[in-house]
Amino acid sequence: MKQYHFDEVIERHATSSVKYDQLKEVFGSDDLLPLWVADMDFRTPDFIVDALRKRCAHEVFGYTFASDDYYNSILAWLDYKYGWRVERDWISYIPGIVKGISFVVDCFSNEGDKIIIQPPVYHPFRLIPEGMGREVVYNPLRLTQDGYEMDFEQLETLVDEKCKIFILCSPHNPGGIVWPKETLMRLADFCHKHHILVISDEIHAEMTFPGNKHIPFSALSEAAAANSISFMAPSKTFNIAGIVSSYAVVPDPAVREKFFAYLHARELNAGTIFAYEATIAAYTYGAEWLQQMRQYVMRNVDYVDEYLQKHIPQIKVYRPQASFLLWLDCHGLGMKQEALVAFFIQKAKLALNDGSMFGTEGEGFMRMNIGCPRSVIDKALQQLEKAVADLG
Ligand SMILES: Cc1ncc(COP(=O)(O)O)c(C=O)c1O
């Protein structure tokens, strides 16, 4: 079996990388270890690069449609990963999940309608509806001894007939939460009862760690399927976010007809040559690489957790069940959010995501991207340890 290597440090500066080349713009300094934007520093796997090279060798890049191979690779992957038998005509390419959210908001709600989200959550869930003149309704997650939970009692008090869409993050970012089946079932029943369409953003699903089970929302039950759009993608998993390849899966005929007509009328369902090629390669050859990558990331989780427990006990890891984004509980440092953010930048020389960008519930937290070689993590932790020690 081929062994992939994730320890290699690859120079990414001067590639117009958001993570590396926009440090100064966002953090005010270039001199920081970038552990923020959610792409990985690992080499994109050889089978994807080979597929792209092969296509490049043809040297003509005209208009291209989604081939049978594209659809079949997705169908086989969803069956392999989740035992989900999907039909080809349930699938549509979309140019990114964030854009996909805006399409659904546009298609299924009007200005002044309400969209429900559950902070702390990926910030475009708020920014997109807000920017489109919708009212964002917050149903914050509850942080208990056992971790984050959805607050269904609160949800009942928030809902009214203006609520048209619920944006679910599954697995949930930040925190890497894989929602239990009972939770998803309860949510599906709630949304079905109140005629609320669920957008289920499942971009992190493929990186669910062993011992946890991701269930695609639209595969959950009849109530869920009747009222939902699941968004999926190989882009996070295989580190091809810049290629922009995502897709919607919509089992319900009425929802599908409306949404796909919307996409079609605007040609928003037209992918690029490279998106199709990369998806086919990822889903045809990617299983083994994904196993190995996940193992590496899981060891990174343990590494950070053990290091913090031993050397920086003021900061705690919220143990993720999926993906490469660590939610660090920094309350033990006793700083207000502004001071915490300044501390990470100015003292530790680290560029992490400010927890409060995901909602006020994220105050006291920072999000650390550990999709990188362990040597980089080690360097980051040493910088952090020194900065904390210097606090006296
Ligand atoms: C939950 C979630 N959804 C969507 C995205 C971005 O998806 P896309 O690049 O397809 O818009 C991210 C990236 O971090 C994410 O964490």
Image (cartoon, rainbow, N blue to C red):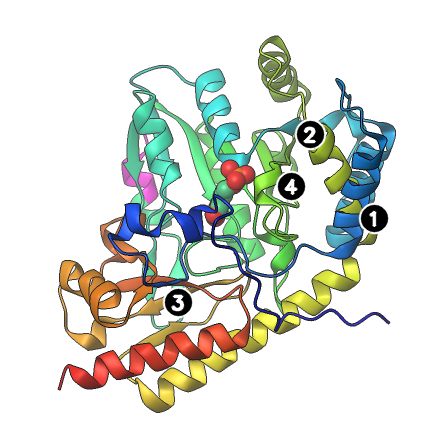
Which residue position is annotated with label 1?
A: 284
Q: Which residue is mark 2?
A: 251
Query: Residue 363 appears at what percent x and percent y?
Result: 23, 59
The residue indicated by pointer 4 is 221
Q: Nearer the viewer, mark 3 or mark 4?
A: 3
Q: Are marks 3 and 4 in contact (CB under 8 Å)?
A: no
Q: Amino acid at mark 3?
A: Gly
Residue 159 in magenta?
Answer: yes
> Mark 2 to mark 3: distance in Å?
32 Å
**Pointers 2 and 3 in contact (CB under 8 A)?**
no
Q: Is residue 234 magenta?
A: no
Q: Which residues are magenta?
A: 155-160
Residue beneath label 3, please? 147
Query: What residue appears at the point 71 percent right and 69 percent down from the top-left corner?
Result: 292
Q: What secondary structure is found at the residue carrying circle 2?
A: loop
SS of the residue at dot 1?
helix
Residue at 21 percent across and 86 percent down: it is 389
Q: Mark 3–mark 1 contact, CB under 8 Å?
A: no
CA separation in Å, label 3 and label 4: 25 Å
* Mark 1 neighbour density, 10 Å: few (under 14) some (14–19) many (20 or more): some
Q: Residue at x 25, y 63 (%)?
A: 345
Which image quarter: residue 74?
Answer: top right
Q: CA distance from mark 2 to mark 1?
A: 23 Å
Q: Secondary structure at mark 3?
A: strand
